[in-house]
Image (tube, coloured by chain):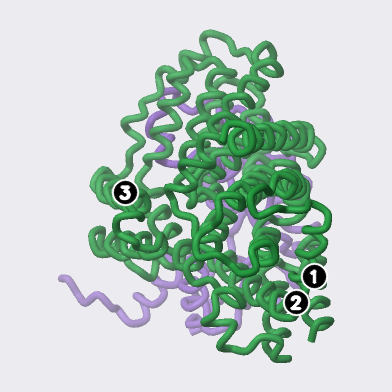
Amino acid sequence: MFWLATLTFAAVYIGIVSEKVNKTTAALCGAAVVLCFRVVSVDEALFDAGLGVDWGVIFLLISMMIIVNILARTGLFQYVAVRAAKMGRGEPFRVMIILAVVTAVASSFLDNVTTVLLMAPVTLVVAQQLETDPIPMLITEALASNIGGTATLIGDPPNIMIGSRAGLSFLDFLVHVAPGVVVIMISWLLAWKLVFSSRMKAKPELCDRIMAMDENRMIVDPALLKKSAVILALVIAGFLSHSLTRLDPSVVAFTGAAFLLLLTKENPAKALSEVEWPTVCFFIGLFIIVGATVKVGMIEILSKQVISVTKPQPDNMFGLTMAVVWFSGLASAIVDNIPYVATMNPLIIETTRAVYGSVPAHVPPAVMPVWWALSLGACLGGNGTAIGASANVVVCGISERAGHKITFARFLKYGAPTTLFTIAVSAVYLWLRYYVVS
Amino acid sequence: MHIKEAMKTKVRAIAPETRFREILNIHDTEEVHRIYVTDSRGKLLGVITSYDILKLLVPEYLGASVARGIVEDGRSFVENAFERYKERTARELMTTPVLSIGPDDPLLAAQTLLRDKNVYALAVVAPDGELLGEVTRMDVLRRLHRAFGFGGDTT
């Protein structure tokens, strides 16, 4: 059983990294193998969050996709993007920075892929009107969306998984990760200023084209916008009031999605068809495979290795925190961060069990920074390469179809320094906040 | 009823080496919606429709909601696209394979294909691949109308 689970896990990982097999297909086949050979039972796979599918994650993902897909049809994002470009007075560098900030903020509440799918086309229009190279703007947006997504529980799937598995709330992420992300974003944009501000210029008459755009005409459906914005605001309020209501984020989002369907009279068949089922199924498959590796003890063996190297103590896990943030950053640049976090979650839980003798009901203060290190490392590591995060892949695709091919090397030139820089800032943030100040 | 009773045999065909600027010219001056691409023996290779040309001239990233807010008349978009594609050949730009049907197929087959594929016309092709003509939605409906007189007599 041990070898069957381990080999299946390895085969699925190799399949995903080499891109020889579609990642959803690979994950589903792997899950089928461990289920057929009864490495995990059906009951464990479906009803045991530690050994099987974490339905909280699945419901949260589906619900947010429904809400965001409806919101996306209103024209709000086009409006905001053009407003941003006008705030930048049509000067390419200023526009790029403001669009990056808008993308980061939007990504912290919406899925990164959705955000860039909405922002990138408008960015191409702006760049076209300014007759400037759109590629720096587009790559900057992809990077900004991954940085912004790190800030909240719902910003990026790794955070959803971490929050659900570790029992960390939306507010926890807002208090612990978001300030770090703000620091990271500001320092990254300052670094960007050094690199780009002198390089990007547009003729004054072209800036006028941007200033002449009428963003008010871009709101396609004001009634739909009002309804979906109200629901999204209520859902976020629901996430924030978790300590009062004790409602799981998945329940809050699910309720929001259900009532949005009722309020807007959207055809559920259409709204549901826009859910990214391949991603959802990818999660389901991964949960089952990783559950199998937990059950056979593979994760336990790995956690012993981790403990012997980083020597975590019940009151101080500095070594583990630093190891996790750096290793996650590098690993996520190569491996999809979703399977990575799916594997790391039980690893950190096993490590906690080994250090404390049992898994405490609440995350002990010493373990908190380890989870934040995983979140920061896994989310920011995605910026490393053109394939490190889904948002990067999507942006490269849009750019290529518009006749501006972003080569792997070109992305790497922007992405790799960004990853190293942001991970370094994260490490400093974690060190200062949890080991110096407290 | 068969396709050959409803089809048009007069269709516009060009060689695969024809450049985009010539194609635009043909499309504009002859007002044809579909330009078929055939080899020297008349074998059908592909088709370029008004829709294909429209898609080439307006960038995919420009959505309708953003387009409504652009004050400029769109010249820069079309000029960029024209510069990019003007030397491309029909072979590079054409849609292939072409939805087609045989002259001896029943008309009902054309009706269902036109409906299911949501296209305006089907190429009519001989078994050896030679382009014989086309059958459009209008051709099919006109033939049915003539045969059954549906819609009633309004006089």
- Can residue B131 be seen here? The reply is no
Q: Which quarter of the figure is the C terminus of chain B placed in?
A: bottom left
Q: Residue furthest top?
A: A204
Q: Residue at x 25, y 63 (%)?
A: A265
Cα–Cα gap, marks 2 and 3: 40 Å
**SS at badge 1:** helix
Q: Colour of chain B?
A: purple
Q: Position of residue B142 (x, y in %)?
A: 39, 70
Percent x, y of residue A402: 63, 39
Tag 1: residue type? Ile
Query: Does the image show residue B6?
Result: yes
Classify mark 2: residues with Cα within 10 Å, few (<14), some (14-19) or many (20+): some
Amino acid tagged 2: Gly
Q: Report helix, strand or loop for mark 3.
A: helix
For the residue labelled by badge 2, is the local secondary structure a helix, a strand or a loop?
Answer: loop
A267 vs B134, left or right, is left
User: Badge 3: few (under 14), some or many (20 or more) residues near its Cα, within 10 Å?
Assistant: few
Horizontal arrangement in the rendering, residue B122 relative to residue A346 (left or right) = left
Answer with mark 2 or mark 3, whichever residue precedes in sequence: 3
Query: Which residue carries the number 3 mark?
Result: A237
**Chain rendered green:** A
At 72% from the left and 31% from the top, the residue drawn is A421
Query: Does residue A298 lie above or below A433 as drawn?
Result: below
Question: Percent x, y for residue B95?
Answer: 66, 57
Can you tell which mark lies on residue A301?
1
Q: What label does residue A348 carry, if any?
A: none
Pointer 3 indicates a residue of which chain? A
Earlier in the chain: of badge 1 and badge 3, it is: 3
Q: Is residue A332 above or below residue B71?
A: below
Residue identified by numbered label 2: A297
